[in-house]
Amino acid sequence: MAARIFRRSRNAMQSGKAREGAWVLEFESHAPRRPDPLMGWSGGTDTQSQVTLTFDSFEAAKGYADRQGIAYHLVPPSERKLRLQSYADNFR
């Protein structure tokens, strides 16, 4: 049972930062997903991949994984790049 720990980023459809800083522990799928013959949706038999746990800090997520014996890997958070420009830059 392996998991990945990552920091949740801001959704492109929202302007706020409500759940941006949360750390998430998400289990990786062990079985491949396959299309359903009737509806065509992709699905699988691995229900563990549907579980996501949210933590306030990386240390809390790491501590939980260590206590439960879960192998994990860290996905480093990407830094936000601010692009400062003025209204006059639109006309250059």
Image (cartoon, grey):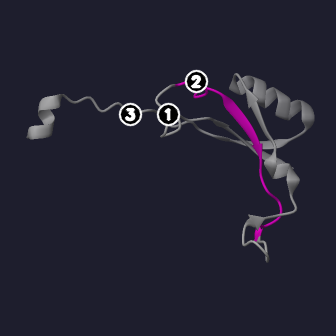
Would residue 17 appear left or right of 45 to someone viewing this image? left
- Magenta residue span: 17-34
Q: Name the residue under label 2.
A: 18
Looking at the picture, which amino acid does disc 1 mark? Gln
Q: Quadrant of residue 80?
A: top left
SS under mark 1 = loop
Q: Where is residue 70 in the image (x, y as percent from the top left)?
A: 86, 41
Would residue 19 appear left or right of 84 to someone viewing this image? right
Label 2 Cα crowd, 10 Å radius (few <14 / some 14-19 / many 20+): few
Q: Name the residue under label 3.
A: 81
Give yes or no for contact between labels 2 and 1 (Cβ–Cβ under 8 Å): yes
Query: Residue shown at 77%/52% (left/top)?
Result: 28
Q: Name the residue under label 1.
A: 14
Q: Where is residue 15 in the image (x, y as percent from the top left)?
A: 46, 29
Query: Residue shown at 87%/62% (left/top)?
Result: 45
The prevailing secondary structure element of the residues shown in magenta is: loop
